[in-house]
Amino acid sequence: MSCDSDPYIFTTDTLPSNLRFLPPLANGHLGWRVYNNIMHMGGVYNGEGGRCHRADVPCPLAVKVELEEPVQHTYSLDTHKGIFIHTLSSASATATQSLYSHRHYPNLMVMEILLERQATSQEPVTVKLVSSFTPQSKDIRFETGPDYRGGSHIQGQTTTAEYPGGSCPTVHLIWTPVPVTLMLPPEHSEARWGFILVAASSLDLAEASFDEGLNLMATGSLRPSHEKAWQELWLQSKVEVTGSESLCKALIGCMFYLLSAFPSIHDTSSSFGGVSPGGLSNGGEGQDYWGHVFWDQDIWMYPGIALFYPKLARAVLEYRVGTIDGAKDNAQKQGYKGLKFPWESAVSGREVCPEDIYGQQEIHINGDVTLAFQHYLYLTEDLSMFREGLGSEVIYGVADYWVSRVTWKPEDQKYHLDGVMPPDEYYYNVNDSVYTNTVAKLGLQFAVELAELLQHPAPKEWQAVAEYIKIPFDEEHQYHPEYDGYIKGHPVKQADTVMLGYPLGLPMSPEVRRNDLEAYEPVTDPHGPAMTWGMFAIGWLELGEAEKAQLLLEKCFNNIQGPFQVWSESPDGSGAVNFLTEFRRTAWHSRHCFPTTSSSFVSVV
């Protein structure tokens, strides 16, 4: 990479004034924003139905380091190694604090302190450890447990299950106690200390993980094993940028934060809890979509992960398979057959959206889910996911839902989906959303195809509805209206119809593709999510319009909040933080390889 400095390291001497933009550290199981006294665990939610949110878990590593004399501060996020480093330099000593969520051992978080003498003075050097940790949570009733091998221990359960009769997750924390001060004795030139935190769902797992952490420290393998795991990940995907350091860092940040939301490629526990728009580090009550899983995971984040990391892609599909019972319940409550995946999902697959209309009408989520399964099969040819992995139940169940949900209208000899909300959430209770009907068509066609591969008898209705479902098209203007009755020129919230070309792949002529782009780009809300502009950029690239794509790429980057390349949902910093939905789409459309300036070029390989 031809960047002036190491593009994998984001460095500053001043922390962002808005603490929401401090860097998240996560490993697919534990997520934490540095210095925050709250962290989250994958699959641990509190609250019933629409009140369900990621449970706040207290973080014993919420510690800031201070020296008594004047210091120069440096804060760095090393994305190649997955470590946040705070360095304090004074005339007499340098203190370095390193923080990381262990990439290979998912129940483990680590803080390391290194104190080095800089002067010849033989005076002791003292560093203060200022903690904001309290062993309490508004979501979990914690009790103090017996110490374990020198570690403090608390345990508790969430207060409210996701649905009546559901279980309340248990959380165990064991950690190395953090003293108020550390001292470098006069006769030493340097000293190191390590502090580990374990978070687990059972006492046995917590103790075994704490044992593992102590053993790794004793053998000097704690940090090397973490760095090796990150190195393994980066070897499977690579970002190349020449001529633009800011673009280089933006794309690396995209990859790093998204990969942080996924489990280890060696994880076989099948306990992955999905990816929410704000990642594991965010999603408490009333924040960052409550930590729920949306279509963002299956449509926006999934494609690039599937291309580079098939094992991680399968984890996404296994998460959806694990929610089949909840999806059955959703369909039955709506009065339909098959499976209805929730617009907002937590653990069970039952709808947890705080506002009922989205769960009732934004039914394109079903097609978004099945499209991820379809892409997986085409990329990997792994039929075991559909046989033993029960992926076929997802595909067939969604097909049954579409068949029961459509209405046949003799006047046009077409099937229709009425009373829906398209991805453009400015409109609701509309008929025949072109995006929704297209993903339904694709899902039904794939169900027929999969049934043939698995020698499963396919109901003839699957093919019939796929063939005759209405896909709105304006013959006069040669473009796709967003829904039946859409008035051309009316404002839209975000990418919707323009997604017919990519990722849906609906066949159309270059003229129609251009007309769709030109119809919707000028009326799309400029304050909407940046992921929208990535969709337009891809469309223009397909048509060979690199300069137009370049302008839209730059528009995406208005949502990056420095210095740690943390994305916000909106350019003004509002909305969800560490908005993973934007990451993957930005990197994904950069992959199409186009000149970004006269002297820069980008591709993802």
Image: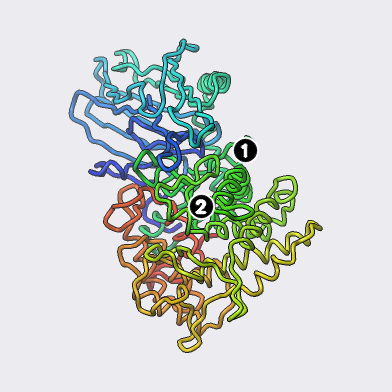
Label 2 sits on what residue type?
A: Gln
- The x and y percentages for residue 195 are 42, 22
Q: Position of residue 339 (x, y in %)?
A: 61, 52
Mark 2, residue position: 297
Looking at the rendered structure, the secondary structure element under dot 2 is helix
Q: Residue at x 74, y 62 (%)?
A: 459
Q: Is 25 situated left or right of 268 in this image?
A: left
Viewer-side residue, 174 vs 389: 389
Q: Nearer the viewer, residue 215 or 166?
A: 166
CA gap, disc 2 to disc 1?
A: 17 Å
Identify the secondary structure beneath mark 1. loop
Q: Residue furthest left?
A: 70
Q: Residues within 10 Å of mark 1 (few under 14, many from 20)?
A: few
Residue marked by disc 1: 270
Residue 496 % position (x, y): 45, 68
Is 376 left, or right, of 141 in this rendering?
right
